[in-house]
Amino acid sequence: MSGKQRKDETKTEEPTNGRRRPAKPNSVREWAKSIVIALVIWFFLRALLVEAFRIPSGSMENTLLIGDFLFVNKALYGAEIPVVKKRLPAFREPKRSDIVIFKSPEDPGVNVVKRVIGLPGDTLAMIGNVIYVNGEVLDEPYVEQANPLADPEDPRMRAWQVRYLVERDRRTYRPTLKNWGPIVVSADSFFVMGDNRDNSYDSRYWGYLGRDRIAGRPLFIYYSFDREGLLPLPFLTKIRWGRIFSTPD
């Protein structure tokens, strides 16, 4: 072997206890790769499995309070795949009394939470503030009555309900907040209401909720904060500790 060959071999060999030293990784590229992977995982988890949701109004009191933060199960009713707008198979369909999160029929960019009262094909009526489903009284232990004597008439109710009215004269039909129907729920749709019946903008006003708008069901409350709390040390006392990890029913 020539001297030149021995010299070249000496340059390429980097013995470290008999092993070649590993190449130094590009730390910036590795960090960027990790961040991209984490974002992709987060995106798919949020889109297909679980999403956070905050209760903005009192329409579901006292089941859900303003300041409750929820994790929502999006897989239960079949999560919507982003971009292609197709749904994955559902584990089950919404049932009566399920609390559901859905896209507002009037503003698709806003998520709303209500309770399922009527299923497709049900005949619904409210008489004297009592819900009847297919002629039978619906037991509703969750209902909150903020103003039990108020029963205003609202033209928005008649505008859509009259099309689904049965056993009533449409010309004289004048529904009120606590007296309306009977109406029949259309196919692939649901009738939803807030538990706080006197302070809830729900199906009574804007109509049936399409199945395609239902996004999920609450899993549990992971945080709850009372903005109206008056006790000292608000960063501790305003937290509703007893609601954390509870499951709304």
Image (tube, rainbow, N blue to C red):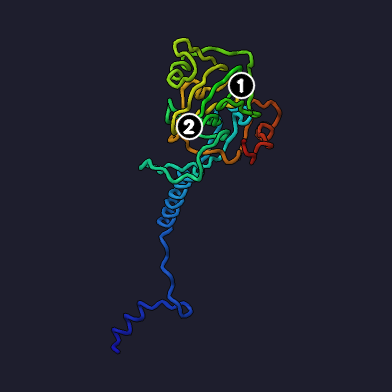
Residue located 59% across and 31% down the image:
67
Residue depicted at 46% across the width and 80% down the height? 18
| Residue that sits furthest to the top in the current view | 172
Q: Is residue 6 above or below residue 76?
A: below
Q: Amino acid at mark 1?
A: Val
Q: Is residue 166 left or right of residue 238?
A: left
Between marks 1 and 2, how big is the CA–CA gap?
20 Å
User: Can you tell which quarter of the image residue 144 is in?
Assistant: top right
Residue 17 image offset from top left, x and y in percent: 48, 79
| Residue hosting label 1 | 130
Q: Could you say which is closer to the camera, residue 187 or residue 5?
A: 187
Residue 130: % across, % down: 61, 21
Q: Residue furthest bottom?
A: 1
Residue 245's label in the rendered image is none
The image position of residue 132, as x and y in percent, is 58, 24
User: Visible in this render: residue 149?
Assistant: yes
Q: Are marks 1 and 2 in contact (CB under 8 Å)?
A: no
Image location (x, y in percent) of residue 62: 64, 28
Quadrant placement of the N terminus? bottom left
Q: Residues within 10 Å of mark 2 (few under 14, many from 20)?
A: some
Going by the numbered disc 2, the residue's amino acid type is Pro
Q: Is residue 14 above or below residue 227?
A: below
**Is label 2 in a helix, a strand or a loop?**
loop
- Relative depth, front residue between 171 and 97: 171
The residue indicated by pointer 2 is: 120
As helix, strand or loop, the secondary structure at mark 1 comes to strand
Sequence-first tag of 1 and 2: 2
Q: Residue at x 62, y 32 (%)?
A: 225
Dot 1 surroundings within 10 Å: few (below 14), some, or many (20 or more)? some
Question: Can the viewer see residue 57 in this picture?
Answer: no
Q: Is residue 180 above or below residue 17?
A: above
